[in-house]
């Protein structure tokens, strides 16, 4: 079951009230755009201003989340792409995005959030983007992951991708989940499953927390770096005092990575 955002969690995103870039720069040395370009395997000086995006509000299922389309639109604009929310929703909105000649169309129902590249007929999705972005953030915060022990908490959509990306970065990855069988399944990606969730957390200083799990401060090892896309997001005073860095945002890193990766499909090798 995908974690569903609520308006209060994203109300600060359109105007960047969280000032995410300065927090990310402190923890990782990179801005959201820098993380997204690295996650999309693009050069750090890539100019994205030639790309245009449409954000289509989708009313299916549990319906519109107030502020979601405006947040995605603001996130894409901060990447220096041209972006707008379509006037229509659903199929009408999608057709308006195509008619506007948008390179990328972004939309989310209750099950999937995609960035569709209209030229290359390929899409990226938010689970992939969130996992890649938070793995890149952890790598930058830790000064590289080659040969280092990393724990992924949560073997869901994001955790499963995160295991693969962290392994690609050379990390020695363990995975834990309250449903042990879900962790065991990730051995096929080279992760070591750990049944005791609490002990796994205590034994690691590099964590990617992709679970809707509030980690009690008692379990957090001194000097931990926690890359934490999971929602709900909360760390108590003890946890915050023991951690060296806790990286989190409710939507931005994942949405930025999926948008930049989608655009990258239109950037040919020779460019
Ligand atoms: O406003 C709209 O267009 C809604 N249909 C958006 C629904 C998004 C549901 N998904 C989530 O809340 C989270 C997001 C971070 C993306 C994945 N799950």
Image (cartoon, helix red, strand yellow):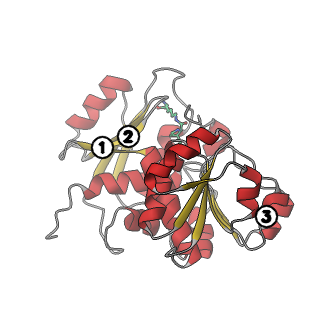
Query: Mark 2 or mark 1, which is nearer the start of the sequence?
Result: 2
State the residue lying farthest toward the top.
61
At x 60%, y 70%, the residue is 22
Residue 173: image x %, image y %? 54, 62
Residue 170: image x %, image y %? 46, 71
How far separated are the C-alphas under marks 1 and 3? 37 Å
The local crowd at label 1, few if under 14, some if 14 to 19, many if 20 or more residues have their Cα within 10 Å, is many
| Quadrant of the rendered image containing residue 118 | top left
Q: Dot 2 corresponds to which residue?
A: 114
In the image shown, does 237 or 82 lie closer to the viewer? 237
Screen quadrant of the N terminus? top right
Q: Dot 3 corresponds to which residue?
A: 240
Query: Mark 3 or mark 1, which is nearer the start of the sequence?
Result: 1
Q: Is residue 24 visible?
A: yes
The local crowd at label 2, few if under 14, some if 14 to 19, many if 20 or more residues have their Cα within 10 Å, is many
Element type where label 1 sits in the image: strand
Q: Dot 1 corresponds to which residue?
A: 123
Element type where label 2 sits in the image: strand
């Amino acid at each position: 079951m995908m974690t569903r955002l609520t308006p209060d969690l994203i109300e600060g995103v359109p105007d960047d009230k969280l000032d995410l870039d300065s927090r990310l720069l402190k923890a990782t040395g990179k801005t959201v755009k820098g993380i997204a370009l690295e996650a999309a395997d693009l050069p750090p000086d890539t100019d994205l201003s030639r790309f245009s995006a449409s954000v289509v509000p989708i009313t299916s299922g549990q319906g519109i989340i107030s502020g979601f389309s405006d947040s995605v639109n603001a996130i894409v604009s901060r990447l220096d792409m041209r972006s707008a929310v379509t006037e229509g929703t659903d199929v009408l909105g999608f057709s308006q995005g195509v008619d506007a000649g948008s390179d990328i169309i972004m939309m989310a129902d209750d099950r999937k959030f995609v960035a569709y590249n209209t030229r290359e007929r390929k899409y990226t999705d938010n689970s992939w983007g969130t996992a890649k972005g938070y793995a890149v953030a952890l790598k930058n915060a830790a000064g590289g992951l080659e040969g280092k022990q990393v724990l992924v908490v949560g073997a869901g959509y994001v955790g499963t991708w995160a295991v693969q990306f962290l392994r690609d970065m050379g990390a020695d990855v363990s995975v834990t989940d309250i449903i042990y069988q879900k962790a065991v399944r990730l051995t096929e990606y080279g992760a070591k499953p750990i049944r005791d969730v609490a002990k796994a957390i205590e034994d690691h200083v590099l964590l990617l927390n992709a679970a809707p799990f509030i980690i009690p401060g008692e379990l957090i090892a001194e000097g931990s770096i926690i890359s934490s896309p999971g929602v709900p997001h909360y760390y108590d005073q003890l946890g915050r005092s023991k951690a060296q860095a806790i990286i989190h945002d409710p939507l931005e890193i994942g949405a930025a990575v999926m948008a930049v990766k989608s655009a990258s499909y239109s950037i040919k090798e020779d460019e």
